[in-house]
Image (tube, rainbow, N blue to C red):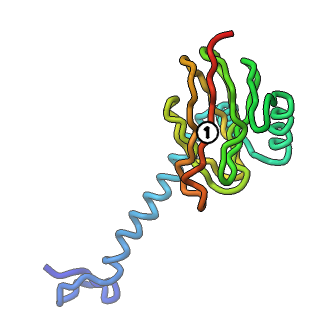
Amino acid sequence: MTAFDPAEGQASPSGERPWTALIGMPLIFLVLGGLGAVVGVRASTTLLDDTVLQQRYRVADESFFAEAKAFYERNKIAPGAVRMRPGETMYLLAQSWAYLPELRLQAGQRYVAWVASTDVRHGFLLRDQGLSFLLEPGYAYRVELLFEEPGTYAVSCNEYCGLGHAAMIGRIIVEGQP
C-alpha cells in the first residue's frame, strides 16, 4: 500500500507517511479535544448557581483578614484560643507553621468556618470530619463542622509548606453540652 504525499498530490511510491500525517492527526485530535473540554466546562459552569460557588470560597483580602482579627478579639479566652458560640461564623488561619486560633466548640452544634492561608500554599486535613483540601493564598474556603463527641481534634497541614511543615498542627477542642 502506498501513502498519500500531499506535496505531490499522489501516493508516495516509497510507502512512507508524510510528516504532516505523523503529527497532523494527533494535533487535530488534541485541538478538537481541547475545544470540547472548554465548551464542556463552560456549559457546566453556567448550569451552577453563582451563589452556591460564592458560598464555598471567597477572596481573602484585607477586609477578610480584618473580619478574622475582629472575630479573634471578640471570642478570645486565652492567647491563641477562642471559644465559639453556636451560630457565629469563625475563622481559622494557616500560617507558617501553625493553625490559629485554637477553636473551642460545643459537641452536637453546627459551625461554619472560613479557612485561609496567610502566606503560602498549605493543606487542610481534618480526618475526623473527612475534610482534606488545599489552601491557596488569596482565597478563603467555607467549611461546615459538626462534632458529635467531645475531644481534641487535630487539624494538620498535608501539603509541604517549608521546614516547619511536620510540626504544623492546630487543635479543635470540643467540649460537652453546657
Estimate how packed mark 1 is, as few (under 14), some (14 to 19) or many (20 or more) residues with alpha carbons within 10 Å: few
Give the residue displayed 58% in from the left and 55% down from the top: 165
Q: Nearer the viewer, residue 117 or 157?
A: 157
Give the residue displayed 62% in from the left and 23% down from the top: 174
Q: Position of residue 84 (x, y in %)?
A: 74, 23
Give the residue displayed 37% in from the left and 74% down from the top: 24
Q: Nearer the viewer, residue 165 or 31?
A: 165
Q: Is residue 43 visible?
A: no
Local SS, label 1 = helix
Query: Where on the picture, by quarter, is residue 92?
Result: top right
Q: Nearer the viewer, residue 176 or 60?
A: 176
Give the residue displayed 68% in from the left and 35% down from the top: 50
Relative to residue 11, is residue 139 depicted above or below? above
Relative to residue 163, is residue 95 depicted above or below? above
Q: Is residue 166 visible?
A: yes
Q: Position of residue 139 (x, y in %)?
A: 70, 47
Q: Residue furthest left?
A: 1
Amino acid on which disc 1 is placed: Thr
Determine which residue is flagged by label 1: 46
In-image side of 103 versus 62 (left or right): left
Where is the N terminus found, in terms of image quarters? bottom left
Q: Nearer the viewer, residue 88 or 31?
A: 88
Q: Residue furthest top?
A: 178
In-image side of 43 versus 53 (left or right): left
Where is the C terminus found, in terms of image quarters? top right
Q: Position of residue 114 (x, y in %)?
A: 70, 35
Q: Position of residue 142 (x, y in %)?
A: 66, 34
Relative to residue 139, is residue 54 depicted above or below? above
